Structures are given as structure tokens and as C-alpha cells.
Image (cartoon, helix red, strand yellow):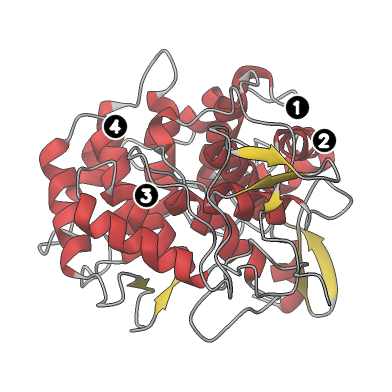
Amino acid sequence: MSASALRRRPLRLLAISALALTATLPAVTAAQAATPAPAPTAPASSVSSASGDATTYRPDAAAAGWLARQLVNGDHFESVFDGTAYPDQGLTIDAVLAFAAAGSADQAAARATAWLARPEILSGYLGDGTTEAYAGATAKLLLAAEVRGTAPSAFGGVDLPARLRSLLTPSGRFSDRSQWGDYSNAFGQSLALIALQRTPGGAPASAVDFLAAAQCADGGFPVAFGQATCTSDTDATALAAQALAATGRSAKAKAGLDWLTAHQNTDGGFAAAGATASNANSTGLATAALLPGGRFISGLKGWSSLVKLQQGCSADPAVRGAVAYDASGFNPANAARATAQAVVGLSGQGLAGLSAHGARPSAPTLACPAPAARP
């Protein structure tokens, strides 16, 4: 496929950030702060500083606040390819889900949702619905619409549940309908089950069966279906475990959690496929599956590893709250995606019940002690 053809294909990155955890996690300041922030003086997640700006002691809210301030024109993200910036609907959805998980930046989430509903943005991500229709993208946007409380059957003029169900094949797999081929995978299948389970009709049994049957012998799940060798992947397993738990396949979900627990690094984090070093993206997804699944020791280790990657009070004020991709340090090129996906592991909910209801409108900054006055 030519480079120009690749550029015409929509950016359909399906790595989710905004998964979250059901366990209640302690409200602490971001790690790597040179001086610890004082203990919270109010039970709310955010307090007002002397200047009137919202500040927070919670790692998830601080991360979400930083993420909101990175939105292009205040309503979306972009990705750069060959020196040209393209709208990144997938990352924008990750941010919307992250804001809901953290219960903050609701104004930014509303603007981003309105941007996603614009016809040219919507069709560029989902396809035109006839010759081009993308399963994973449709599932991910459906979940975001549900989380935002926006009518999914009329999102930007598209009936998202009906569109997604139209992509269900006789095998139970949700597949792309596209001249570029079928790029559907376990990420999209899992998201489809989670999103459709939240609809009145529920998730199709054949689709649940298809995902369950894709489980590798070791208990994990692969990204791609139908490979000669089933190779388990951290991100795919974390999503599949949540999807199967939501649809009543507890034994399959448990086996996936067992695989995650067995593949956790000594620093508490998780590595991407083919790598050994922990990263915030995979750790956020895995932690979001472990804690709701009752794996509290492993889940809290993952949560702690994410906090260690967060930029704290000793960092430049412009990056405080952001989460670095890995221990090599903060990199602005990948920080937005790393932060969005880390929020899910730093929050306290799960995808199946994630809701933006009651989210605070502001995008808080990390609460840090005031600089000491010079003598």
C-alpha cells in the first residue's frame, strides 16, 4: 500500500486509555515530587487555590487536568505523519474516557464530544457506513457516547449501535467493511462487547463466544485473530478480561487475570508485546483490569508504578500531572497518549460502568506547596 493511501486511511488507534478501576485508591500527591504536598484539607477531589484555580491532590485528576490543557483548540488531539498534522479521533476518545474516569475536565470532555460528532470528523473515523465501516472505531466511539450520556443512536446523525451490529459476521467477529482490508482485532471485539452490553439488546452471544474462543492456551489473549501461533498480549488480555467479565464469562476472565498477574514486572508495571520494560500504556490497561477483578495486590502494584511515572511538584509547572511513557523520562511526543491511558489505572472505576455523570467541569492542576519565600 502506498504512503498516500496510508495517509487517506483514518487514524484508528484503539489503545484505550480511559479504562478504570473499581477499588477506592488513596488520594496522594504525584510521585517524583521533591517536597511532598500537604494533606488534603477538604474531602472533595479538588480545592481552590488562592488564585481561584482548581487544584487537586489526586493523581488521576491531576493527569486528566494536564491532558485537557493539551487539546488542540481545546477540543481534539492530532497526530503528525510525514510532517503533516491529522485529526486523531482515537486519542481524543481516549481523553474523553479519561476525563470521565477521573471525574474532572468535564467542560473539555463536552467540547471534545461535540468535535467528534462533526460530520467530517465522524465519517473520517467510522467510514461512510456503506463501502467503508470500521468495527473497532465504531465500538470505541459508541462507548464514549454512552459514557458521556449522549444518545448513541443519534450521534452526529449516526446510529452507532445499529452500525456496530451491522458489522457482526456469522462467525461472531466484528469485522471492518473496507477497500483497505479487515483490520479488526481483539481490541475492537472487546470494546464492542463492553459497549453493546450497555445497550438494551446486550452483547450478541455469538460475539462473546468468538472472543472467548480466541483465548490462548496460557490464558492470555492475542491482538490479531487467526494466527498460526496464539501469542498473548498484555493490552489485548486486559481488554478481553473486562469484556468477558461484563458479559458473564467469569472463568475466561479469571484466566486472563491470572495471565496478567503472572506477567507483571518486578516494578509493578507491564510491558508491551516483545518488550521487557514497563510502560504507562500497558500498565494502565492491566491495572484497570486487575483491580475490578479483585486482584488487589497486583492492581495496587500497578497503580503505584503509574504514580512513579507521573510528573510531580519538582517538574516544570507546564508538565505537572502528566505521565511519562516509561522510566526513561518525560517525552512530549508520547505523553498525551501515555497520560490518557494511565488515567484509567489511576482512577477507580471500570469500563462497563464508566460514566461522566457528576464530573467536575474544571481541569485541575496538581496541588503543590507554595515556593518558600526568600529571606
Picture residue at 64% right of the left edge, 17% below the top:
151
Q: Residue at x 58, y 83 (%)?
A: 329
**Can you say whether 2 is above or below 300 in the image?**
below
Residue under pointer 1:
156
Residue type (three-letter) at the residue carrying disc 1: Gly
Of mark 1 and mark 2, the one earlier in the sequence is 2
Q: Amino acid at mark 4?
A: Ala
- Residue 343: image x %, image y %? 52, 52
Q: Are marks 3 and 1 in contact (CB under 8 Å)?
A: no
Judge depth for marks 4 and 2 and give the one in front. 4
Which badge, 3 or 4, comes first in the chain's sequence?
A: 4
Which residue carries the number 2 mark?
A: 118
Mark 4 lies on residue: 246
x 59%, y 28%: residue:
356
Q: Residue furthest top?
A: 200
Question: On residue 288, which mark appears?
Answer: 3
**What is the three-letter code of the residue carrying label 3?**
Ala
Q: Is residue 72 visible?
A: yes
Label 3: few (<14), some (14–19) or many (≥20) C-alpha neighbours in 10 Å: many
Image quadrant occupied by the C terminus:
bottom right
Give the image location of residue 230, x and y in percent: 21, 68
